[in-house]
Image (cartoon, rainbow, N blue to C red):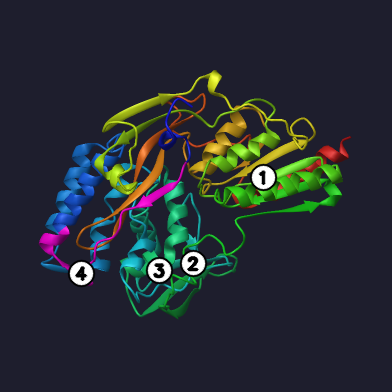
Amino acid sequence: MKSILLFSAILLTALTVSPSDPGGRTVTREQAVADIDSMTAYIRGTHPDMFALCPEEVYNATADRVKASLPDSIDIAEFYKHIGILPPLLGDGHTSIYSGDVYKAIEGLPVFPLFMKFDLSSGDFYLPNTRNRVLSINGHEAADISARMKTYASGESDAFRLQRVELEFPALMHLLYPAGEYTIAYVDEDALTDQIEYMTVDAAPVNLGRDYPFALSAEAPYSYSFMNDISTCILDFREFNGFEKFSELIREMFTEMEQRGTENLIIDLRRNGGGNSELGDELFQYISPCPFLQYGGMTVRVSRYLREAFNNIDLGAEDGIHTFDNTPEDLIGLRDNPLRFAGKGNVYLLTGTYTFSSAADFAWAFRYFGMGTVIGEETGGWIISYGDVIHRRMPHSGIPVGCSWKKFYGYGATDSETHGVIPDHTVPADRALDYTIELIRSARSAR
């Protein structure tokens, strides 16, 4: 890689600027306007191409309407309802105001107590673990709730935005429709009648330190298991973080696969939102048949905001836009590895709409370098995407805003790759594992 360390292709949520004191739970109109201007200046000065996907005049007109709608005094939760729609306009899944961060700025704010399951094509949503389709909540039509929440979710595609809404529903529901009690009207789609049923739930307290409601899972970020009857190992890979721990786990896994003579490996990235791409490079050392590289190049913006985020260390570059390109000479070579699985068996990669950031980059390199078969849904993260996030708190409300400072190109990709990784076999994400297992069974029975 022709770059200094800070420009290496590692997708991370970078350092956060030390927060200012929010100064209570309300701000004046003048302070709110100043926060909007501060956020816009921050994104403009940090993002490598702020208006690549959203015309500048559209963003500016929306910001002006938001400012005009502000009352003389506004609490922080209400302020989020105004300002939270601005970053998603830019079409960058990493540049956002995360609803969970609002909860960190307001102690004691309750949440809606239920997660909902969304149909990512229609926007319909269902009570958890049922076929009970929600019609309304406290009189608000479900379609209106879904459409409104999507405007607060950053993402490159509509499907990915709805996936984020699903994951943030408890927070978004209470922030956008605050109440102490919620009455839900729903219909059972498996019933023979269209009878409308009702249930009532209370808003619930949340302790962000212990039962933070927006995490994907309380389970380990990665684990593996075996299906001995089909000689298959399944790596459940939910998070690209913890390089040393992950390296140890996969070394153990491939050792056991070698001992068992395992013929198939399934890597499950359906619920992986990304992290540190170095974990992907380490896994490729076991499954790639050839030298590889995840990124063909990148564009970065160096600015005072970036220097402040990194505590004013010397970044080795002047302020402005810098471009770095990789060539075949930059490919990562395969090290000596007696446990390499490439050439010994079949590798399957499962993807879904939530496969994002480093997980989507991994999926692109996996497919580009011919490491195996991709099964599931198009990834929510695009092949050409923005990333590496630094955060800055708005000076008066204290709400953090995250902003990308790099643009990444998947290796071999061009600017026309404005989409996610397309699977070899497209099936709904929740059926991808069963589908893959059936493929393996069919192949084994055909021998």
Q: How would you rate the neighbour count of disc 4 (Cα within 10 Å): few for under 14, some for 14-19, many for 20 or more?
A: few
Q: Is residue 141 visible?
A: no
Q: How far apart, in angstroms, are the residues tagged by discs 2 and 3?
A: 15 Å
Q: Residue 267 carries which label?
A: 1
Q: How would you rate the neighbour count of disc 2 (Cα within 10 Å): few for under 14, some for 14-19, many for 20 or more?
A: many
The residue labelled by disc 2 is 115
Q: How far apart, in angstroms, are the residues tagged by discs 4 and 2?
A: 32 Å
Q: How far apart, in angstroms, are the residues tagged by discs 2 and 1?
A: 26 Å
Element type at marker 1? strand
Q: What residue type is labelled 4?
A: Gly
Q: What residue type is labelled 3?
A: Ser
Circles 4 and 1: CB atoms closer than 8 Å? no
Q: Nearer the viewer, residue 53 or 320?
A: 320
Sequence-earlier tag: 3 or 4: 4
Q: Residue 318 carries which label?
A: none
Range shown magenta: 11-32
User: Residue at position x 33%, y 42% from top?
Assistant: 313
The residue labelled by disc 4 is 23
Q: Residue 136 carries which label?
A: 3
State whether residue 290 is above or below residue 5.
above
User: Residue at position x 39%, y 66% from top?
Assistant: 171
Q: How many marks?
A: 4
